[in-house]
Image (cartoon, grey):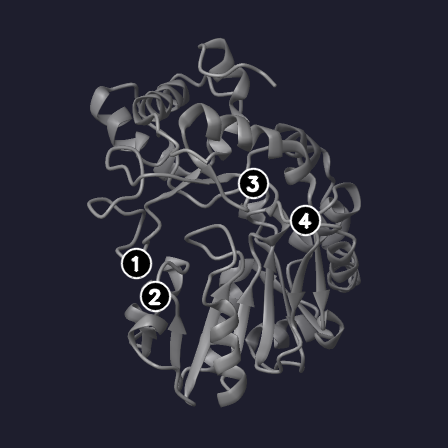
Amino acid sequence: MGQIKQDTDKITKIAWTLMLASAQNKLDVPGEYLWNIPTSADFDEIRGKSWGVYSSGNCIKDKQMIDYTNTVNLNKYLRDPWIVKKYEEYFPIWLNECPRFNFSGLDDFKYSCFSQGSQEYFLNFYMQHREKRFRVLKGEYWWHMEVWKNLGLQWAYIEDDDIKPNDVVIISFPFARIGDEHPQQKNVIDQCEKLGVPVMLDFIYLPNTTYDKLQIDLTPTCIESLSFSMSKTFPVANARVAIRMTRKKMHDPMQISNDENVSNRLASGLGFECMQNFKIDYMVSKYLEEQKHWCALLGLTPTKVVHFAFGDAYTQNGRSYKKRFFSDFNDQQNRYNLGPLFANKNLLHSLGYHDKI
């Protein structure tokens, strides 16, 4: 297979086009984060915001899903004492319905707990293991390292030191930087199994993966917990819909609130409605051909996450060593988020950047 030539000029023009359209309120699907919404069409404002077009790990802003969630009546869940439990019980059923991946050992994770976004569980995980040294591979989700630094917790990259008995490991699957299984994942889990080191697997991007019948082995007993979230799957990130699955029941603040029946019923209700109406691989089925098309058009390489592509690092419009997204630990400068292109296909087609498929 020949070398793919990246069209950086077109990539840059599209980023500027989307930010200018945002400032003029002409996007097919408007942005939802202040850091990526221009306050004017001023040159410096557009230039300053254009770098964020491809930089985030956010989900695809699918208009059909947005239109659906706008119709959901969440008020009925506010006083429904059973909705959190319904959400927790239905999630593994919904997960197992996906033909793209198959779990070995998922049934051993019998305890599910609603989480107010993955970050709530991460914080509870940090508290649980605060006396240990946290370990991640380089390119992992930057939020972990930023929080550990600010809280003064011990941590180190796995590449920089051997795994020790007092360590605890977090691995995202697919891995945050590359949108695929990390080449060292199996080896790391094998080491943790031998040493009795707890492992948390973060599956936030799994629903949007393009695998075909992938086998996921959860049988190593060192795998203590699993984290899932709808934030990267569906355009519901700001509702904070996530779940933790564990082998043993936890007794941390998150579980205490769950047992008290004061977990977020509105978020649980929205998550339950989404699961009832959309398959877990909805985005993959809808956008896989779009991913291939945009990658061919821009000279990028598709990853196993349907809205991610891989290419050369860029300085003006994305992650680079000179400009990183929110944190110096955000080391994912070669990963491009194609979601804004998917969401604004009609606009880009009208401007001659994309032939409809």
Q: In the visual, does 343 lie left or right of 54? A: right
Residue 212's disc number:
4
Badge 2: residue crowd in 10 Å (few <14, some 14–19, many ≥20):
many
Taking the view exactly as shown, the residue that stands out farthest to the front is 1
Q: In the visual, does 247 lie left or right of 162? A: right
Q: Which label's residue is closer to the chain start, 4 or 1?
A: 4
Distance from the alpha carbon under mark 3 to that under mark 2: 26 Å
Residue 329's disc number:
1
Seen at 61% across and 58% down, the residue is: 242
Q: In the visual, does 113 lie left or right of 82? A: left
Task: Give the x, y percent position of residue 252.
Answer: 56, 79
Check disc 4 and report its element: helix, strand or loop. loop
Instruction: Indicate the amino acid at tag 1.
Output: Phe
Circle 2 residue: 145
Q: Which label's residue is closer to the chain start, 3 or 2?
A: 2
Q: Quadrant of residue 134?
A: bottom left
Instruction: Indicate the amino acid at tag 2.
Output: Met
| Nearer-the-camera pick, 173 or 84 | 173
Check disc 1 and report its element: helix, strand or loop. loop
Distance from the alpha carbon under mark 3 to that under mark 4: 13 Å
Distance from the alpha carbon under mark 1 to that under mark 3: 24 Å
Which one is closest to the eye, mark 3 or mark 4? 4
Seen at 54% across and 16% down, the residue is: 346
Circles 3 and 2: CB atoms closer than 8 Å: no
Task: Give the x, y percent position of residue 9.
Answer: 30, 22
Which one is closest to the eye, mark 4 or mark 1? 4
Check disc 3 and report its element: helix, strand or loop. loop
Instruction: Indicate the amino acid at tag 3.
Output: Val
